[in-house]
Image (cartoon, rainbow, N blue to C red):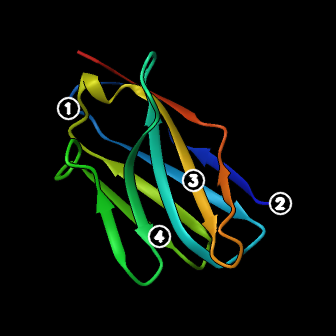
Amino acid sequence: QVQLVESGGGFVQAGASLKLSCEAAPIYTFAFLAWYRQAPGDQRELVARVVDGAGTYVAPSVKGRFTISRNDAKNAVALQMNNLKVEDTAVYFCNARIAISSQDYWGQGTQVTVSS
């Protein structure tokens, strides 16, 4: 069983920055670590993903503003969010897939609210 603990959400004004962090325990080899978000009434959508040995993906809607990074020493993934917009308001979820089993795990979610 993998636990993903997220932190860093909050309430900010448009144009501000936030950094989300997610630490996984116990340590596994993950095929990928990712961040998703879900706004009220919307489906959960992929924001960014870092794939083991294959680089990163960032959704077009946040490209140039959001950066995903992985810290293997801490078994963690971070999402740096700059120039936040009102439409970035959502619950952000950390997602991890174990390489050997392809099993997915999700964090509990952290709220990001951006006001105009």
Residue that carries the numbered disc 4 in the rendered image: 70
Residue beneath the point at 78% across and 68% down: 26
In-image side of 31 versus 103 (left or right): left
**Disc 4 packing (10 Å; few <14; some 14–19; many ≥20):** many
Q: Residue 15 carries which label?
A: 1
Residue that carries the numbered disc 2 in the rendered image: 1
The residue at the far bottom in this view is 53
| Amino acid type, callout 1 | Gly
Real-space CA distance between mark 3 and mark 1, rounded to the nearest whole angstrom: 26 Å
In-image side of 63 versus 35 (left or right): left
Q: How far across and how far down the image is residue 19, in percent?
A: 41, 47
Name the front one of labels 2 and 4.
2
The residue at the far left in this view is 64
Q: Earlier in the sequence, mark 4 or mark 1?
A: 1
Can residue 40 be seen here? The reply is yes
Q: Which of marks 1 and 2 is nearer the N terminus?
A: 2
| Amino acid type, callout 4 | Arg
- 77 or 39: which is nearer to us? 39
**Disc 4 secondary structure class:** strand
In-image side of 62 versus 43 (left or right): left
